[in-house]
Image (spheres, rainbow, N blue to C red):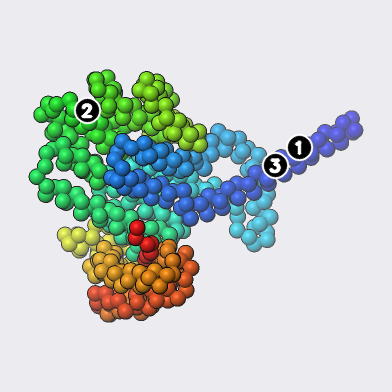
Amino acid sequence: MKTFLRFFLLLLLLIFTLFFNIGIIDIRIEEINFLLGKMATMDDISNSLGIIGKYELIKKRMTLGEEHGANYEFEAKIQALISGDKFLDEKEHQKKKIYRAPVLFILNSIRFILGKEAIKLQEENKILNVIEIAYFWERNRRYQEAIKIYDDVILQQNVPPEIKAAVILHKAFCHSMLSEYEMAKRLYERVISLYPNTDAGIISWKLLDFINSMEEERSKIEAKKISYFEKAKQFYMFMDYRNAIKFFSIFLQEEPVEAYKYEAIFFKGRAHEELGENDEAIEAYRKIIKEDKSKIWAKQANRRMLMMGEFYEQKKQIAEEAKRQLAMYQDQNFINNVQKYSGLFSESSLRKELMKNEKQKKDLKNKSNDSLLALINKIGSLDLTGEKEAQRKEEIARLKEELAAKGNISASAVKELERRRELEENPYRKPSVLKQIIDENSVQLKYIYNRKLRQGIKISGKIIVELTIKPNGSVYDAKIIRSNVGDRQFEEEITKQIKLWKFKPVPEHLGDLTVNYPFEFYEEE
């Protein structure tokens, strides 16, 4: 009996040791996954690629035309590169909890005795998993769902500034794709103002420039006296999908000739597709496939159906239906070019979880005001129009009183907060105004670059310059923070010239403004 008892206890000890070691390994792996996820989110590598790639695709469509095969291939490549997720299957996660809980308790007890902070992987991973859900909705063109989650993340405390800047950047992109350009511009400007030293802050300058150029073109279209068809098509090319749908609908009500009818239905469907209105897009494409006797636009509609089935809706039925039709059109080359990227496309565990019940949302409603950063973000989201100025000041005063009462904010911090807020609101320190002056003076930098080329020195690349602008408008300092040009003398000439620039003056009490701006130098062909 004693021998059996010893054997049983030894077996229990071995089982406990085994599960304890598995638990430690599991926890350490999750720690590594968390750190890698945090690094990826902070670097924003794949996620920024999606935004930049989308804008680049729009430019390609303007240059090559919507129907060009290279555009489809580029689109497929981008979707493949940004696919996949870091989402953990919930059932598997629950299984791990069974044996991890006691192990985590023991490890945290030891850490407590040693005076170390407890491991809280679930809490730390929560924010990254929630952001991943928003990224998923964004890359599948469900922009409204993404915006709701981004709004919740922005209101959270203790989110690193690099991550918060990236989240606001993505929120701005979603608004731009929904034709809400003013909101997109305000958010890009906010990233530039509040997070100038982040990658998102630097990227925002370029994205803001892109949105402004699109807006200029849209203004020209509105002033033109052209047909509804041409107006709608031009609105589509310049990202104004709502107006494109409106004018295509008016055109189609006039019972146009078939040569233009199916082209209009196709581009109307494309506008719906870009807005994430996939049911309306599929309905339009199926109508063309059924009715277009010329098969010209039926072929294009099937191409879009294949793209949606493979890369957006991920519905094999739609993709297979389109492939059968395209094979009949002898469009096998197109199928092959697209499918070489569909093989790289990651089947998302997150998709399965979300599609199971789309109404289930992550709860991120913890909107406490226990930090200065939370206060800045709360004020930044208020309506800053003239009509609500009194309400805004009252809200700021209330929030400051709350934080002061809790002892979370000092008088100097309040003063700095007010200065930053007032500086951000000043019309002469708005990113759009600063950019106008930078663009006007960039001619001087181009002259320096061309002089180098004339001397036979072949250089090219990008330079990110940190400018410190004094209240009087002078540039106190300009230094290179990143460059791939590889010519120190050229870089010094650039910063020397920038220091001579003059911006609009502001009241002295607003203090200095630091701006990180990207300059590009390439030889004109």
Under mark 3, the amino acid is: Ile
Q: Residue at x 20, y 32 (%)?
A: 264
Closer to the chain start, of discs 3 and 1, is: 1
Q: Which residue is mark 3?
A: 22
The x, y position of residue 236, in whole percent, is 23, 41
The x, y position of residue 348, in whole percent, is 49, 35
Q: Which residue is mark 1?
A: 15
Q: Which residue is mark 2?
A: 262
The x, y position of residue 223, in whole percent, is 11, 49
Under mark 1, the amino acid is: Ile
Q: Is residue 238 visible?
A: yes
Could you say which is closer to the camera, residue 151 or residue 135? Answer: 135
The x, y position of residue 208, in whole percent, is 30, 57
Q: Residues within 10 Å of mark 1 (few under 14, many from 20)?
A: few
The quadrant in which residue 187 appears is: bottom left
Alpha carbon of mark 3 to alpha carbon of mark 1: how far? Answer: 11 Å
Closer to the chain start, of discs 3 and 2, is: 3
Alpha carbon of mark 3 to alpha carbon of mark 2: how far? Answer: 61 Å
